[in-house]
Image: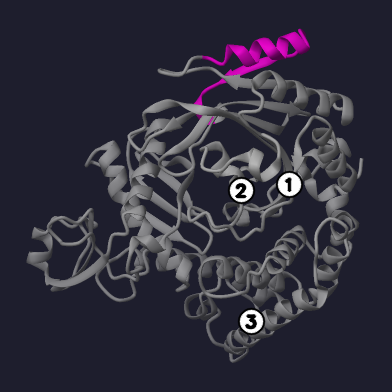
Amino acid sequence: MESREIRQKFLEFFEGKGHKVVPSSPLVTDDPSVLFTTAGMQQFKPYYLGVKDPMSDFGSKNTVSVQKSVRTSDIEEVGDERHLTFFEMLGNFSFGGYWKKEAIEYAHEFVTEVMGLKIDYVTIFEGEEGVPKDEESERIWKSIDPSIRVRAFGRADNFWGPTGTEGPCGPTTEIYVDGIEIWNIVFNEFYQSADKTLRPLDIKGIDTGMGLERLAMVSQEVQTVFDTDLFVSILSVAKSRIVADHVRSAVFMISDGVRPSNSERGYVLRRLIRRAFVYQRDLKPVVEAVVNHLSYKDFYEFNLNEVWSVFETETNKFKETLDAGLKEFEKGRDPFVLFTSYGFPLELTKELAKEKGIEINEKDFEERFKKHQEMSRRGMEAKFKGGLAGHSDKEVQYHTVTHLLHQALRDVLGHDVSQKGSNITPERLRFDFAFPRKMTDEEKKRVEEIVNEKISEALPVNRVILPKAEAEKTGALHFFGDKYGDEISVYYIGDSMEHAYSKEFCGGPHVSNTSELGKFKIQKEEAVSAGVRRIKAVLE
């Protein structure tokens, strides 16, 4: 089934079940906790909380939508089988209109009868202290199909929310087809307060999400999302999956009013366009393929001239920067200068050198790259970058949030935690720290909450230069055993050194206030070596 037909059948199915079809909200959202719209439920948050009345606005307590969504945490993974920066989220929602029985029955009917797919298994919430196992959902699934396999998992897998430190949340049930999760149904029945206590919501709500790209993949029986009809015509002119994904995302961003800049949404757009340009110089055919795509042109509005004008202006600017850097290669100078002086990510530096036929001693490059990272964590001089690969606003934000992360880890795991290194790119941060075991889901969640609390408190970020002896007396964290100069730069986050939340020996750079950081999210926590753990995190 073609993607445009899937989209239409989804809307028609739920419209036939009494849902009001609501257009996709723009990618640029009023929600201060995220840069872009990341899920279908975002535009409906006020209705779950009872702030707005769905009957007044929609004439129904039930809605359905196909939501344009962007998630920037997967940029580095784009190019594999399923990671995308832009995707469409199919969702049906209810604000006190119906509950678990109808939600599950609708999902089963759409998947099996409308789409003609076979469900492998479903998952439910296994329960924890204060929230019982979701036996009701299990009974409903078994009443529909006694042979269906039902698996139970914990909070990390089958409990959604809240977004931020407080808000609606609840257990979920998920549908798997061909071993792939295609539909997540959230039962919003609790409100979690900032102190993590749960209370029942006055209005129970249904919030579902099903990615169009994944659904098309299993429906069309292809191996990856890039083999679906959503990408075939784009990949006929794009040289790689990365180009196809980035250009598609950029076209939708531009059409929703985003323009390239050095901060926030504009920086994400700039990064996508420039990264695509490195892999393919002629992007116009790819832009045209997206704008003229059969699945998009009748459902969304694009202005090819406007979109291409933004691409052309941005790539021309970037070309000047690239040319300046490439002249350094052509003069026979060190290729490492492109990385250190121009702030290009490592893979771009290699790609550009390769394109110009310039040989890079990769072993030497890697050794110097490691040395560069090692230097970046030393707080003794202005070269300190805290693991930064460049000087962009986003990298400065990530560097600043590592200070909050370091202290939050110590708050949750104990004061034996100490930083062992960091690496920062415009897309994410990596933070290595001494700790003997894997963190629990609860510990990771608490660290996230603390960091986001400090961001929401809009704490000032201050710097003082002190003699070494005085700096050590402040209790500021530093790399013990490192050699420091006679004068130390100390950054503290808070109104005063005495009452600061975080204090560290550091050369910068940092933002001036934590309110500039956005929402902090841990993506992964894993072992690096014996006694050393690594956190990968993003700012959304």
The residue at which mark 3 appears reads as: 318
- Check the image and report above or below for 92 versus 261: above
Residue 43 is marked as 2
- Check the image and report above or below for 67 versus 250: above
- Where, quadrant-wise, is the N terminus in this rendering? top right
Reply yes or no: does residue 219 show up in magenta. Answer: no
Of the numbered discs 1 and 2, the one sitting upstream in the chain is 1
Label 2 packing within 10 angstroms: few (<14), some (14-19), many (20+):
some
* Secondary structure type for disc 3: helix
User: Which quadrant holds residue 16?
Assistant: top right
Q: Residue at x 63, y 69 (%)?
A: 258
Do the residues under discs 3 and 1 have CB atoms within 8 angstroms? no
Residue 150 image position (x, y, % from top left):
67, 15
Q: Residue at x 61, y 72 (%)?
A: 270
* Secondary structure type for disc 2: helix
Decide which of 228, 239 is in the foreground and name it: 228
Reply yes or no: does residue 138 show up in magenta. Answer: yes
* Secondary structure type for disc 1: loop
